[in-house]
Amino acid sequence: MSIYGGWSTTIWFGGAVGNPSTNVGIVTRPDPIFDPALIEVAGTGKRGLYDILMGIKDPRLTVEWIPGYISGSGTPVSDSTNFIRTYQAGAQLATLHYLVKKAPSAVGLTFSNARIDRLTLSCRAGDVLRATAEFLAENVAAVDALCPWSGVEINKALAWPYVSVYVAPKSAPTVPVENTKWHEWRYEVRNNIERLANVNNKGTRSLELRSRRVTGTLVWDFENFTEYTDFVGASADALFALHVKDDDNNYLLGQASWANAQWGRLEVPHGPEDLQLKRFPFTSLNLVSE
């Protein structure tokens, strides 16, 4: 039998354990990893190993995907970014199903009690919204062969016009203004999850969230130097609002009236041409105010 382009892959979540309700989007690159964390026991005077022991099992799933519309919808819907908004802060997923074949039977893997350790969301003008996440899971098993997979498929890409970026000038730090001159933006969430061992079965007792870091980059244009200085400001320690929202006005980063961000190292323009494609690295206090 010929294989055309490999497997048709979807990542399903939600619903009951055996009945996921929807998939994360259009999966472009899945990378499941099952690391047994082997302990190699070597000894002096012996060329080979004395023993090989099982360490703490470390199941992971790294996925690149494109958030999208619900099948058959011509406009964005609230669920188009729901998965990212719900789980980017590290909320636990009871089950995450890596499915490489939907019909006639389910073939794949189920990661249980999973959390996003690291997520990157990015978009370029003229392109689609792209996401990459690394999931850590407590366990992994073969997917339930009786799973009906009756959920809703996402198969239409979410493009750049359906995501908005808002940046507040330093003169009004809690009043963000929609930025319509951006070329590219991205932000990254690092939840710094620590895997705690179950010493009885060499598995995972729990996945604990440690200090979160949210950083990103915004590339955009300025009309003149005055506009540049208004947004950069003279005070390096003054926070301002930098928010990202989808077309249904749901916040992906930030929230209303919250000054959450600060610019990083900036290159000061020294000519008119330097006001174009300016790169602004930033750090956010968090995803949302706590």
Image: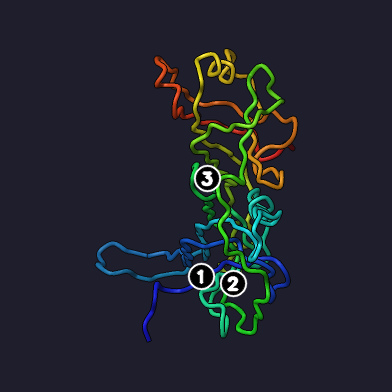
User: Residue 106: x, y in percent?
Assistant: 57, 80
For the residue pair 157 and 35, the one nearer the viewer reads as: 157
Identify the amino acid type marked 3.
Ser
Identify the amino acid type marked 2.
Thr
Check disc 3 and report the residue beneath it.
Answer: 122
Disc 2 from disc 3: Cα separation: 27 Å
The label shown at residue 9 is 1
- Whether the residues at callouts 2 and 1 have beta carbons within 8 Å, the answer is no
Label 1 neighbour load within 10 Å: few <14, some 14-19, many 20+: some
SS for callout 2 = strand
Choose the circle earlier in sequence order: 2 or 1.
1
279 left or right of 197 in image: left
- Which quarter of the rendering shows the C terminus? top right
SS for callout 3 = strand
User: Residue 107: x, y in percent?
Assistant: 54, 79
User: Residue 21: x, y in percent?
Assistant: 69, 69
Disc 1 from disc 3: Cα separation: 22 Å
For the residue pair 48 and 22, the one nearer the viewer reads as: 22
| Residue 271 visible in the snapshot | yes
Check disc 2 and report the residue beneath it.
Answer: 110
Which residue appears at 49% of the width and 32% of the height? 219
For the residue pair 149 and 60, the one nearer the viewer reads as: 149
User: Residue 38: x, y in percent?
Assistant: 43, 66
Identify the amino acid type marked 1.
Thr
Mark 2 against mark 3, which lies toward the viewer?
3
